[in-house]
Image (tube, coloured by chain):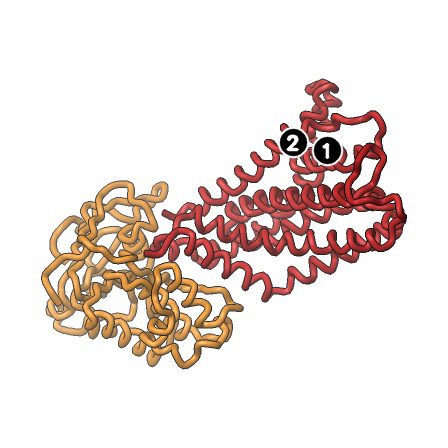
Chain colours: A orange, B red
Amino acid sequence: MTDDVALTATDLRRSYGDVTALDGVSIDVATDSVTALIGPNGSGKTTLLEVLLGIERSDAGTVDYGESDARRQVGYLPQRPTFRPDDTVRETIAFYAALVEDDPDRLLERVGLDTVPDRRVSALSGGMTRLLGIAQALAGDPPILALDEPASGLDPAVSDRIFGVVDSLAADGRTVLLTSHALSLVERTADHVVVVEAGGVAARGSPAALCERTGGPLHETFTDLLSEPTAAVGGGGES
Amino acid sequence: MIRRLDRFWTVFGREVRGLVRTRVVFVLGAVIAALAFGVARAGGGPSGGYVPTVVDVLVVVELLVPAAAFAIGYRALADATARGEPAVLETYPLSPWTYVAGVYAGRAVALLAVVVVPLLALGAHVATTAGPETTVLASHRGVDSVSLYVRFVALTALLGLVTLAVALALSAVANSRRRAILLGLFGLLLAVAGTDVTVLTALGGGLLDESALGTALALTPSGAYRGLVFEHVLSVAFEGRSGFVPTGIALVASLFWWASGLSLAALWAGFR
């Protein structure tokens, strides 16, 4: 982990009609680290992630990536990765790999799916599909990985495996930005946590620093923060 | 450094593989072959020659080809959107134009296979059953020839490619399979009847002068196809008659529908 910044977002705003999804969010994402966006459902985590990726436009604000000559700037795992059901695992990853001249076998090996290259996507479990999604996100060796709820809907053992892969990706020197409700895994894996509430940033810091607020695990701090009537503070600061 | 053309082939290859796997292509090909042969033989066209065969199958082909184009194209982009694929592809160095071109080309190969192969087989059947007056090249009006049949097949392929582009545009607009089905049916109805009915309604309502009817019909995909077939294939059978549609306008109109369909699909696909 370094203090360099991989991505800087300043004063991001996004509304859908009368609903404010992002209300002046500013964050820095440090390189070679895992930054987790946590918050209740509908708090704006996914919108923030998608705006940071450029998939969703913002009404105002800027997103700046650091200098990079990567074939692909950012890898993205959507919340429910879905692939062509009749394609095999290898065919699926070969398609994405070919777009960025990568080696599909290397990608499958990286997430542990090299043992089932001929299995149809329709026959994959939820956890395996998520791993295939992570392999896709790794195609082209992007310096930043954005993972939207990488463990949602998975049993604890599979969630643990997914976060183990995330951990190893950060150890490889990648910048990982993820959203998650799996707070115990976030507490174990993340270097930085940003608590998103009502389109703003309610708190930010390392898991240890946030836990100090209540003296308990991260989910206690999370619950405590959200029970505060003016939790969301938005604005800048360091992540 | 990977080039845009390589990415095009990557998308193209995936489309072809997916279509071969669904077996829809084979079913469509068998249906078109069965209907084309059935209608032609019922009408006695093959024993009369190429032009009589075209007369027999023209109406069926005019309905079947757009139907096949929509069957092959209606889910092409809608399924990808429903899977959330555009958001993922937006993180790749792949432009929506290259993506749509690859999808279109892959589907076009399948469409041409199900349309052209049965028609060529029917042509081969004509070659073995037609009388001796059928020749290779028509030297004057009233002479049947295989070159006229090749023109018919080429014009039919053009109709299929144009309709497929329109189907792809509607598929891009639809973001679910249900909407894709509804829009596909709407587009098919529009392609096979709606545009002609609109022109004829305008004529009946006095909005269109009768002298402009040929031009107006040439502006629609089906009208342009029918007019071009009459003008360049069947005209040998109409002594002293020509000018069913202005050829240039019919071709430009077809090009317009084709380019508009693909452009709309690429713009709607919208990533990057």
Which one is in front, A221 or B162? B162
Amino acid type of the residue tagged 2 in the rendering: Ala
Residue B250 is marked as 2
Residue B256 image position (x, y, % from top left): 56, 34
Label 1 and label 2: CA atoms lie apart by: 8 Å
How many discs appear?
2
- Quarter of the picture holding the C terminus of chain A: bottom left
Residue A220 visible to an observer of this rendering: no
Instruction: Give the mark nearer the N terminus: 1 vs 2.
Output: 1
Q: Is residue B31 above or below residue A103?
A: above
Q: Are marks 1 and 2 in contact (CB under 8 Å)?
A: yes
Look at 89% across and 51% down and name the residue there. B42
Question: Residue A155 location, x and y as percent?
Answer: 37, 77
x, y percentage for residue B92? 35, 55
Would residue A25 appear left or right of B112 to someone viewing this image?
Answer: left
In the picture of the structure, the residue carrying the numbered disc 1 is B227
Q: Name the quadrant containing residue B151.
A: top right
In percent of the image, x 28 and y 74: which residue is there? Answer: A165
**Visible in this render: residue A69?**
yes
Query: Residue A206 placed where, x, y %?
Result: 14, 66
Front residue of A188/A136: it is: A136
* B243 sits left or right of B221 in the view: right
Residue A73, label in figure: none
